[in-house]
Amino acid sequence: MALLDLANPHRFLAFARALVPALALIAAVLLVLGLVLGFRAPPDYQQGETVRIMFIHVPAAWIALGAYTLMAISALGTLVWRHPLADVSAKAAAPIGAAFSLICLLTGALWGRPTWGTYWVWDARLTSVLVLFLVYLGILALWRAIEDPGQAARAVAILTLVGFVNVPIVKFSVDWWNTLHQPASVFRIGGPTIHPVLLTPLLVTAAGFAALFLALHLGAMRNEILRRRVRALRMLAAAGAEAR
Amino acid sequence: MDLGPHAGFILAAYGAAVIVLGLVVLWVLLDHRAQRRALAALEAQGISRRSGSGADVP
């Protein structure tokens, strides 16, 4: 199936109907496997047992950044290519991305207390992730503030692209500034610095989170298409009632 | 399994992730049901895209 075929909402709904259960199943299998591998892995020589928080904290951060990147591409789709499903994709991704960034913040605080002695510090990495979460909330608020989906889509697309400047700041904050947060240890020049026994459960859980994100995103896109269909039919009914 | 003196932090982190993700899954499922029901109710009233200008709208 070509990507352009999915521009037809009817075809997209059929595509999502087939794919969502399969992705949900893959996510469940990978997350259970990641959980088992994560809790069977030996404790870290420095952090001890608390290293297990890494297996959900780091993938949540990756998905939060990935979801925002997807929204930025969707924003281009809305403003430049005018793809009919671009704003549907952006709107569906926002609450899910916000949820993953919230998980990142919560698990980070719970990891920070036993590791650093504090739940929170205003360093560049933590602050930029908080800004990411707040941008997500701002985007969600803007979607709700404008009733017409077309107008809302254009306004949100501009805000999304402006907010995208924060994504490289989150990624490179640990290199650009002195931070309490550790530097990159997986996606870095020279390869990962994490031992394979800890890296494996991290990557398995990350794959599980990615599958879950895709399942939720496609599901939320399907809901948004149905919501717009309901709105169109209600407007049709109202126009019919006025004509009589 | 002994998670050591910081077991509470580890379990709270996993619990928070399960609660937040559970709420998102629930939101998607309930929203899907609500939209399907709203669509079915409209179609039961004879309102559909095929009703065109609204002539068939009751």
Image (spheres, coloured by chain):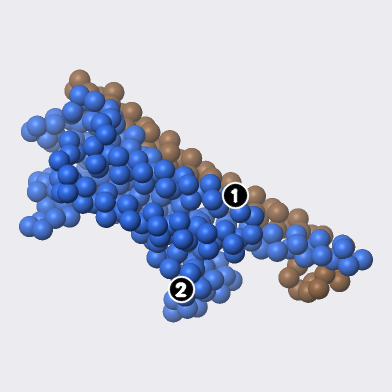
Chain colours: A blue, B brown
Please provide percent x and percent y for residue A63.
33, 51
Left or right: where A94 falls relative to B29: left
Residue farthest to the right, as pictured: A244
Instruction: Looking at the picture, tell me which residue is in the foreground, A225 or B3.
Output: A225
Is residue A214 among the parts visible in the rendering?
Answer: no
Residue visible at 12% across and 35% down in the picture: A44
Q: Which residue is mark 2?
A: A80
- The percent position of residue A76, horizontal first and vertical second, equals 43, 68
Q: Amino acid at mark 1?
A: Ala
The amino acid on which the numbered mark 2 sits, given as a three-letter code, is Val
Spatial CA span between label 1 and label 2:
23 Å
Tell me: A112 left or right of A147.
Answer: left
**Left or right of residue A149: residue A203:** left
Q: Position of residue B48 (x, y in %)?
A: 75, 67
Instruction: From this view, report whether residue A119 is shown above or below residue B24.
Output: above
Chain ID at mark 2? A
In which quadrant will I find the N terminus of chain A? Answer: bottom left
Crowd rating for badge 1 (residues with CA inside 10 Å; few <14, some 14–19, many 20+): few
* A157, above or below B34, in the image: below
Indicate left or right for B30 with A62 as reference: right
Instruction: Judge by depth and name the residue closer to the eye, A149 or A215.
Output: A149
Q: Which residue is mark 1?
A: A145
